Amino acid sequence: MAVITFMSDFGTDDHYVATVKGKILSQNPDQQVVDISHAIRPFDISHAAVVLKSVYRDFPEGTVHLVSVDSIREKSNGIAIQLDGHFFVGFNCGLFSMLSEKDPAEMVEIDVSGDTFPAKDKLAEAALELSNGGNLKKIGQPIDQLVKLLARQLKVTRREIVGNVVNVDHYGNLITNIAKTEFDKILEINGKNSTFTIRFGRESFNQTNAYFSDVESGDCYVLFNSNGVLQIGLNKGDASQLLGLGIDAPVHIEFTS
């Protein structure tokens, strides 16, 4: 039996999360359900994609990821896909296209028309079927069209990387889309004596930190986090609030030889 993860924009003040989990457990009391987050900003597909992309590979292959975000989007039918050895069940609204540059190995459409609570009535059952070793063809009709959305793209030249803040986490840390792999590549191109300046808002840094604790409490740090992307934070503080920066704020890295 595979693990089922659950992520939604339902929040925690109402019964919606418990209702979906109750449906799963009523069918199989031994099913393991792991919550990723239910604090996704309402209807915010980009936020959901950033969070899910950051965590799904930490689960074993075969895990089923149940996602209910923007479930009332017009003409968005249910979908289940297989990608990177994982299964994803949710809505064909573009969210899953933002997880990887790869195309799904297989995908099917799940009819949720006329259903006011598809996460409970249709998608939970589909997730259970996959968790118990079922295949995608048992839960829907094969399709070859995945709604695609473009994630925020980097601008990369030999002298510059321009990215954006793509998420602000619970601590007020600014998570960007600048990957360490891209940073290291441009640094290598410019040679071992090259230097760089990281600019955001009114701040600039000429080095990255290895740990949050490299700076004093209340001071700003810049590091590549465990997901390998540039993170801007405040040691024991809220960087977003202090710097006045949020989603889509530009981040520049300039290189000199």
Image (cartoon, grey):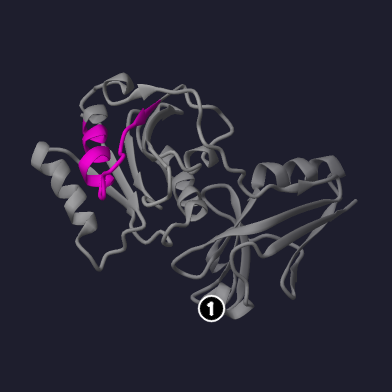
Question: Which amino acid type is marked by label 1?
Answer: Ser
User: Looking at the picture, how far across and down is residue 171, in whole percent?
Assistant: 46, 69
Horizontal side of 65 relative to 176 (left or right) equals left
Q: Dividing the image into 4 quarters, which one contains the N terminus?
A: top left
Horizontal side of 86 relative to 185 (left or right) equals left
Secondary structure beneath disc 1? Answer: loop
Residue in the image at 56% along x and 38% along y? 148
Decide if residue 29 is in sight here.
no
Residue 79 lies in the magenta-colored region: no
Mark 1 crowdedness (10 Å alpha carbons): few <14, some 14-19, many ≥20: few
Quadrant of residue 65 within the rendered picture: top left
Residue in the image at 26% along x and 28% along y? 130
Residue in the image at 26% along x and 33% along y? 126
Vertical order, 45 against 11 (above or below): above
Q: Which residue is mark 1?
A: 217
Quadrant of residue 189 within the rendered picture: top right
User: Looking at the picture, how far across and down is residue 149, in whole percent?
Assistant: 58, 43
User: Looking at the picture, how far across and down is residue 197, in whole percent?
Assistant: 79, 62
**Number of residue marks:** 1
Residue 127 lies in the magenta-colored region: yes
- The range drawn in magenta is 108-128
Front residue of 95/52: it is 95
User: Looking at the picture, how far across and down is residue 80, in whole percent?
Assistant: 37, 31
Vertical order, 126 against 174 (above or below): above
